[in-house]
Amino acid sequence: MLRNQEQILSKIANNDGHGENSAFFDGWKAYDSDPYHPTQNPNGVIQMGLAENQLSMDLVEEWVRNNPQASICTPEGASRFKDIAIYQDYHGLPEFRIAVARFMEKVRGNRVRFDPDRIVMSGGATGTQETLAFCLADPGDALLVPTPYYPGNDRDLTWRTGIELIPVVCDSSNDFKMTRDALETAYNKAQETNTKVKGLLLNNPSNPLGTVLDRETLSMAINFINDKNIHLICDEIYSATVFDEPGFISIAEILQESPDTNPELIHIVYSLSKDLGFPGFRVGILYSYNDAVVTCARKMSSFGLVSTQTQLLVASMLSDEEFMEKFLAESTARLCARRGTLRQGLAQMGVGILKGSAGLYCWMDLRRLLKAATFEAEMELWRVIVNDVRINVSPGASFHCSEPGWFRVCFANMDDETMRVALGRISKLVMQSNKNSESRKPCRRRSKLEISLSFRRLDEIMMSPHSPMTSPLVRART
Amino acid sequence: MEFKSRNQGQLLSKIATNDGHGENSPYFDGWKAYDSDPYHPTENPHGVIQMGLAENQLCFDLIQEWIKNNPKASICTAEGAADFKDIAIYQDYHGLPQFRNAVARFMEKVRGNRVRFDPDRIVMSGGATGAQETLAFCLVDRGEALLVPTPYYPGNDRDLTWRTGVKLVPVVCESSDAFQITRAALEAAYKQAQDSNIRVKGLLLNNPSNPLGTVIDRQTLQESLDFTADKNIHLICDEIYSATVSGQPGFTSIAEVVQENPHCNLDLVHIVYSLSKDLGFPGFRVGVVYSYNDAVVSCARKMSSFGLVSTQTQRLIAGMLSDEEFVDGFLAESRRRLGKRRADMCEGLGQVGIWNLEGNAGLFCWMDLRRLLKAATYEAELELWRLIVNEVKLNVSPGAAFHCSEPGWFRVCFANMDDETMEVAMERIRKFVARKQRRRMELEVSLSFRRRRDELVMMSPHSPMASPLVRART
């Protein structure tokens, strides 16, 4: 029966392109089978592997209560139920497209305009990415993607499309910035294997780095793709999670400043899952400056349109400009504060994170906790974190990071108390690791000063869990 | 701008530059005619009446009533807003358990509780559009084929082949058999594929059928199951019109036939479902893949990430479909109204000698206009269709769009308008037929004696008499 099963299903169904067989998913399983709860399961696994924005839902709930006309199920909105339920035009409700375009402009400080007629729906950013791959590349063609990158890219861009991803390797020596050299290297590598590169995918702000791309890098990228006459896809789904300087610069702004760039090569991926915290609503957006892509993607959107019930709700909410301004300000302030708490807590243990101003996560540096600078050691450390420390974080290998020892830690999907518990657990891990290191040859440690300092810091934390103090001496880069 | 002329064809993929989306067919001209000049009883009484859209708009009053009485089904009402956060962040591709349970229960009810459905086999998709594509991706490789009986829903071409690279091989059904699927036709299609070195991976049935408006009988379902078992290929049953069946013959689901065949290979059987037609909610994009094959359930579920149902909508549907009393009442009333609307339309058409394929399902009739064709050709069919769209101002769908093997058949939808609009449409048809008859009499000089006698009958459009000589089966 098993052999027949393989024969009767497609290659796509039989292969691993969905990406879920990676060891990385064990963390999820550990969480699912034993989820943390402050009272019911205080020893359960704390979920820090899910990039969700849950910090400002109270604002949204209040808005919803005060705006019953946004729903087709309230007395105020029910008269529209029929028209909304039967509306299946893949252009989408005009008010939806206008509201989304306006919101995207607002997030970019009104420095650019977006044309509502170029707003195309999709099944979340997941659907947008796949749709763009189908529109721009043939099976066997490739997209360049800087590492480390979101693991879902493999499934979204390659599983059913048959295209390849070629990594543009970025490393910690320059804070994982993307260089022209790295791009050229990746491009040449493809050429050597006779693989046709059709585009470059950028994620700005970056998942998992939590950083924004600077103007120089964006300009460099746009020059690169223009030279090679390949597409530039910019996934900007974390655009409204930028809470600090440096601020967010959208590819739309760079394009505006680059009249020699062919706009038909430029496409933006967007979604409301991260900026607003609505992953369940599946609001994916594809914005392209290429008319043929807009037309084609719109036809493909039939495979993943946004429920008109949700289109109406989103249209109402996003067009309430006063609310959206208040929301954006408050949301980013809360993200900033929460990240600060995590950063300080980690710094006190001598754990550094990559300096960043965006995202729902930190890129944590645990290289010095590795037994060896290998991915096996990273996996071993990760299993300790999941199974012993009882926190689900995401190991760098799952993001195709070129160096072992980096972990993505999400901070916006829990309350303050849970964050405190998580920090306490991490500090125990670090302390234990320091003890283990001490028992090994001392020459491996960088300095005795660091040992005594980090111990003292840990003692402070253990004795006073509410202490916000951080010492400038052990502060890693933030 | 100089960039625009630069090798767009090279810039984009083959998929983006081919016609696989299906929208370049002349069939879409009817849509454009409607979009640019839509009928409105007061604002545009001479506009085009849309009879090319298979929508179920007859029971929204019942839905509206339920919505009003059940505020908790929404996350936006005072009663439901406390759940807003949990619903908004829920992105598990298994879907809300209450959603899956309610959909499974609803599907059972539609089948008179003659079968059970396992909620854990309910997988979401972006409408039936997404469900079909997902199954094609799971079951068929590029270059391989699915057999599809004609006439069939034009969207199949896009859904099953555009991005998948799969081929469709028609199983030709003819009016001489009332378009029923025969074993001979199945075998012929299979052989045709083999002769072209194309590997067939499955058979797609649409039951009830779009565009025929008929249910597939038990014997044909059994034969199809036997056929696919023999060939070790999949059987995909699109049952999206399952709750639009009124009167007899009733609806038999493949799930019932499977139940009666305990030794059949369940790994080959899959159902496509959606709430777009039975409930009238195409905007909500509630598609379902139901498979008896565990590996397909698992794979399709992973693929559902590309087209999950909004949790806001999952919650609403879960609330509505788990109200068993409401569902029972809705199904009964919806069937009754559909049955009456269909009967009214068929009677109205019959009065002018236009007959439909006998059927009691779907949101449309399969209308026989063969005798109005200038010649038994598709060119003549297209010419007649342009006349209907541009002069009679009705958007109906020509048989060629459904890959029908014989010209002259048209699909006419009846459930997407109110009674008054239906009457206007009928009047336009009556006038058109009368005009055409007069013109024909003026132009044709020598006719067979039999035909001239028929036309004399037809001169009186209000005559309830129909000549047995020109009546097709209804």
Image: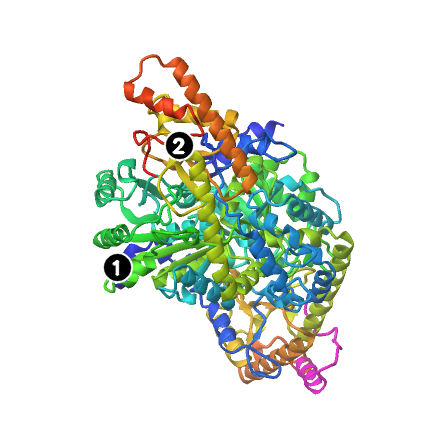
User: Which residue does the image show at 57% across and 51% down from the upper left?
Assistant: A85
At mark 1, the secondary structure is helix
The residue that label 2 is drawn on is B354
The foreground one among B309 and B369 is B369
The amino acid type found where label 1 is placed reads Asn
Q: Residues within 10 Å of mark 2 (few under 14, many from 20)?
A: many
The residue that label 1 is drawn on is A4
Q: Residues within 10 Å of mark 1 (few under 14, many from 20)?
A: few
- Mark whose residue sits in front, 2 or 1: 2
Q: Which residues are magenta?
A: A454-478
Image coordinates of residue A367 in percent, x first then y, are 57, 70
Image coordinates of residue A348 in percent, x first then y, are 69, 76
The foreground one among A224 and B71 is B71
> How far is disc 2 from disc 1 in space, using C-alphas?
50 Å
Residue under mark 1: which chain is it in?
A: A
- Answer above or below: position of A359 versus B387: below
Image coordinates of residue A431 in percent, x first then y, are 61, 82
Quarter of the image that includes the N terminus of chain A: bottom left
User: Which residue does the image show at 56% across and 27% down from the upper left?
Assistant: B5
Q: Main secondary structure of the magenta part?
A: loop
- Answer above or below: position of A376 versus A290: below
Q: Is residue A187 visible?
A: no
Quarter of the image that includes the C terminus of chain A: bottom right
The amino acid type found where label 2 is placed reads Ile
Is there one chain holding both mark 2 and mark 1? no
Query: Could you say which quadrant of the image residue A208 lies in?
Result: bottom right
B415 drawn magenta: no
